[in-house]
Each structure stands twice: as structure tokens, then as C-alpha cells.
Image: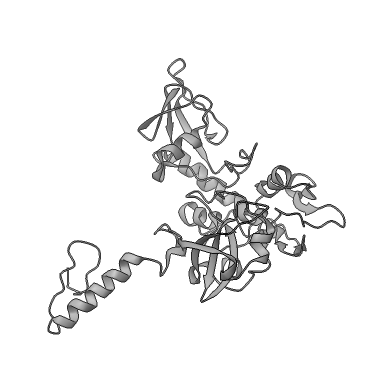
Amino acid sequence: MAKVTIDGIEIEVPDGTTILQAARMIGGDIVPPAMCYYSKLKTSGGYCRTCLVKVSKGSEKDPRPMPKPVASCRTTVMDGMEVLNITSPEVLEARAGVVEMLLLNHPLDCPVCDQAGECHLQDLAYEHGKAETRYEFPRREFEKIDIGDKVQLHMTRCIMCFRCVKVADQITDGRVHGVINRGDAAEISTYIEKAIDNDFSGNVIDVCPVGALTDKTFRFKSRVWYTKPVDAHRDCPTCSGNVRLWYKGEDVARVTARKDTYGEAEEWICNSCRFDHKKTSDWVIEGPTKVDRHSVISANHYENLRMLKASIDRQRESLPHGDKVNLGTGALDPNNEEK
């Protein structure tokens, strides 16, 4: 076991744990963002550099700081290590530079992108992005590519995180797509005259952190904040059958894997569950998905706000017009009093 301190919080973790994994064990704001690392995919991480942190103390045996920021997803902790993330201006400046680089060839077409509201790059750009860029050269542009009857590839949006390639390598029975060319000419593409059509190919949509790989059956049908996510399951012979249904009205708009706090699929699901079963009668409904209140998906899903509104309405009906309603302490001020 090794003790590591991250932004002043100490935790003891097993040997071989990375800084990012240790931060996730602590949780909260000190967890570095990650665009390429995926805990369920072997050898993922080390590509996007958004998880950079500063090691101010290497270990008890060698207390010297590391000379420059390191990728927390690939750096293992050592006993006595001290790490700075959000408490380091140097790290925040470096992360802003990484985000600027990621946005060089990623179009800001959020209003027409199906990933809007679920995009990790959108979150990063909001937290660390800048209104202008120093880049003066032509951006990379690609034609839209059909890589299967259910998956649409927008290579222009791709940030080369390689998650989709690793999914195809590790959980499907035959990878037919990968990276071609090198350097700034590198791109994701299928082999000549091949299409992605194996049983678990739809998982490349779930792991894509941006809108480069999208679900054709859901394209342009709705924004995620207009849908209601519900956890459900079915007896599936191919996968676990544990999914998340996204309702628009009474219809199932799409089916995805269930995701954890960090946007990672809890279990892989097959294409049959994802694309072929979009009727409520196909599923056993478990209940509404618990959505983080900070997520845009949580719009109109706050049970406590609905209860609060009902309580306010009841109190107003029983009081003369203009009388104050006591809501206790909080940000809401229905009386519009001047401060």
C-alpha cells in the first residue's frame, strides 16, 4: 500500500494504482478530466493529455518534484507522493493549452451535434477554453463516412482518443476499422469495402467522448435534455441486458449502456439490445435514472423542485395575495425583495 496526497487530501491505495485512479477513489472536484482513458479498456490513456497534474513531491525516498506536469492516467503513485491538480495554476494553464489544441480541428458545431449535452469536450471547453485561438492555418476537414448501417462517423470532430479502436480490438470478434496515415493526417477509417457490423459494434458510440461517432437511429431526433432516462433490463442471450432507455414522450428514442459518474459504460451491451428493441414491452422497467443535478440532462428531472413548487402553490392558495412564503434558507427568493 502507498499513501498519496492529492490537493491536500491523503489516501492509501494499493501499489500500482495510478494518480487518476487514486483521485477517483477520493472523488469530487479534484478528479482530473480524462478524454482518452477508459477504465474498462486495456492500454487506454496517455493520448489526450487533459489529465495532466503536477507532482510536487515524488515520494518519501525521493522527495524531489517531477520537472514537468505528468499524465495522471499513466503515472503510478509512490509512497509519500504529493500531487497538485486544481490547486496548481501551472496545471490549469497547461490544461487550457491542451483544450485549445483539441479545439484546433474540432468544429464548434454543438448546435447541430447529437453529442451536445453529453460531450466531455464541451465541458472542458466551458471550464478551460478561450474565446479566441492562436491557430492561423487551415483546419482538417473530412467527408462524412458511412462505416456501418447504424454508426455515422464525423471524422472532422474526432480528437483521436483511440477508444473506439480499443473497443473493437478488445470486445468484438473482428476489428475492421483503425487509424490510417500519420501525424496531422491520421484519421479513423474502415478497411477497404468493410463495414462495422459485429454484435458489439454499437459500443464505439458509447465510448466516443465527442460527436465523432453517433447513432444513426437517433440522429437529429431530440436533444438529450428533452428526453427522460430510465434504467431497464431484459433477458438477453448475448449481453447482460442492463441498459438505459431514453424516452421522448411515450416512445423510446434510443438505448444506451448505463454509465457511471465518469461517463464510462458499466457493462457492454449488444447491438440487438441497442438497436432492435425500442418498445417498452421489450423491457422490464426498473425506474428513473438518477441524474447528477449538474448535468444538462437533469433539466426537468428534479423531483425535489417539483415537490417544492407544489408546496409553494399550496401555501400561496391559503395566504392573501402579497403575503410572504417561508421557504427557509436557500437561493430561491419568491418574494423578490430588494437586497
Is 185 or 16 nearer to us in this picture?
A: 16
Is 247 or 38 nearer to us in this picture?
A: 247
Asked where in the image residue 82 lies, by quadrant, the reply is top left
Q: Is residue 8 left or right of residue 318?
A: right
**Colour scheme of this structure image?**
one colour
Q: Given the current orientation, which residue lies at the most extreme bottom position?
A: 321
Q: Residue at x 81, y 58 (%)?
A: 195
Residue 207 percent across, percent down from the top left: 62, 52
Residue 46 percent across, percent down from the top left: 61, 38
Residue 285 percent across, percent down from the top left: 50, 63
Q: Is residue 150 left or right of residue 34?
A: right
Note whether 320 is above or below 233 in the view shown. Answer: below
Note whether 154 is above or below 267 in the view shown. Answer: below
Q: Residue at x 80, y 54 (%)?
A: 190
Note whether 236 is above or below 90 in the view shown. Answer: below
Q: Residue at x 63, y 61 (%)?
A: 107
Q: Is residue 148 left or right of residue 72?
A: right
Residue 91 percent across, percent down from the top left: 47, 39
Q: How many marks?
A: 0
Note whether 184 is above or below 244 in the view shown. Answer: above
Question: The C terminus appears in which quarter of the rendering?
Answer: bottom left
Q: Given the current orientation, which residue lies at the most extreme right position?
A: 193
Question: The N terminus appears in which quarter of the rendering?
Answer: top left
Q: Is residue 30 left or right of residue 226?
A: left
